[in-house]
């Protein structure tokens, strides 16, 4: 493993002293998947809203559409959290977008010199390269959301050619404890505003590179849709110029 970039260990004390008591953070050194671990806790009625699991290494991490995700030990910020939103479940599909927005806001707060963007529905980009992603699933009376951010990866450790890391982008803060705390604080704020009824889509639109782009969407059914993305519905769907809406699918920017 490259040691060119410092990789401070995860520390619950360091994280907890920077966040509100709404969150309860647990660190596990190695696991299969924080998402699966938290799901098991929910199914056993042992999880509460605000529980967060973060790990140094996971051997069976999951991305969207059942893809696998793996990162060298301590090179990425990998965590999942469980919440029970105070809005109707029919509206929860906007939450993954709010998570992406919170991630982008947190990075901007930590280093205003580095600009991040969001690709609908769940990708974080810096300099046109993928830096992170999110996954969400409902569980019992709540939702579990997983986040992965490439923090200290060197080029040889990147999962795909079009990826990057905060380190490679000369990001000013590479301590995962600080980054996680910043994210939780940003998400707490946006979640409270959303639960109070505020429409946050305008904030997402400002950072979403998919809006105004010609895109190709491959739906789970195999159907291909193309067109210019012009907006986001109240439920987080991507709206194309012909009025059609995409709920889930692989998105490629054509221009």
Image: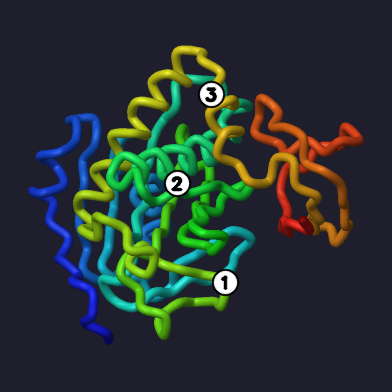
Q: Viewer-nearest of labels 2 and 1?
A: 1
| Residue 165 position within the rendered picture, expressed as x and y whole percent measured from the top left | 40, 66
Residue for badge 3: 200
Task: State whether residue 254 appears in this view.
Answer: yes
Q: Residue 24 lies in what quarter of the image?
A: top left
| Residue 119 placement (x, y as % from top left) | 61, 50
In the foreground, 217 or 204: 204
The quadrant in which the C terminus is found is: bottom right
Q: Give the image's coloring scheme.
A: rainbow
Residue at image mark 2: 145
The quadrant holding residue 23 is top left
Mark 1 nearby-residue class (10 Å; few <14, some 14–19, many ≥20): few
Residue at x-position 80% and y-position 50%? 214
Locate residue 118 relative to residue 215 in the image: left or right: left
Is residue 220 visible from the viewing direction of this image?
A: no
Please determine whether, in this image, residue 26 is positioned above or below residue 154.
above
Pick the quarter of the image with the N terminus.
bottom left
Q: Mark 1 points at which residue?
A: 162
Q: Residues within 10 Å of mark 3 (few under 14, many from 20)?
A: some
Left or right relative to 16: residue 95? right
Q: Where is residue 137 in the image (x, y as percent from the top left)?
A: 53, 46
Q: Which of 230 and 42 is in front in this view?
A: 230
Residue 218 found in image quarter: bottom right
Q: Is mark 3 on a helix, strand or loop?
A: loop
- Mark 1 falls on what kind of element? loop
Circles 2, 3 touching at the beta carbon (< 8 Å)? no
Say left or right for 38 vs 162: left
Determine the CA span between mark 2 and mark 3. 18 Å
Q: Farthest front residue? A: 113
Give the residue drawn at x 73%, y 42%. Answer: 247
- Give the label, 2 or 3, closer to the camera: 3
């Amino acid at each position: 493993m490259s040691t060119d970039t410092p990789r401070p260990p995860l520390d619950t004390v360091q994280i907890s002293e920077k966040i509100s008591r709404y969150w309860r953070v647990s660190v596990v050194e190695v696991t299969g998947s924080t998402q699966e671990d938290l799901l098991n806790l929910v199914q056993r009625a042992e999880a509460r809203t605000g529980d967060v699991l973060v790990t140094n290494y996971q051997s069976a991490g999951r991305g969207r559409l059942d893809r696998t995700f793996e990162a060298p030990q301590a090179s990425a910020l990998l965590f999942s959290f469980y919440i029970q939103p105070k809005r109707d479940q029919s509206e929860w599909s906007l939450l993954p977008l709010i998570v992406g927005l919170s991630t982008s806001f947190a990075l901007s707060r930590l280093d205003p010199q580095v600009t991040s963007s969001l690709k609908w529905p769940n990708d974080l980009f810096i300099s046109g390269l993928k830096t992170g992603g999110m996954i969400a699933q409902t569980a019992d009376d709540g939702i579990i959301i997983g986040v992965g951010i490439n923090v200290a990866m060197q080029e040889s450790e990147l999962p795909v050619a079009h990826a990057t890391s905060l380190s490679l982008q000369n990001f000013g803060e590479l301590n995962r404890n600080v980054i996680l705390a910043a994210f939780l604080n940003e998400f707490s704020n946006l979640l409270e505003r959303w639960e109070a009824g505020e429409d946050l889509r305008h904030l997402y639109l400002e950072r979403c590179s998919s809006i105004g782009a010609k895109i190709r969407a491959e739906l789970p059914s195999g159907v291909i849709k193309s067109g210019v993305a012009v907006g986001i519905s109240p439920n987080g769907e991507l709206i194309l110029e012909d009025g059609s809406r995409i709920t889930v699918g692989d998105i490629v920017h054509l221009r």
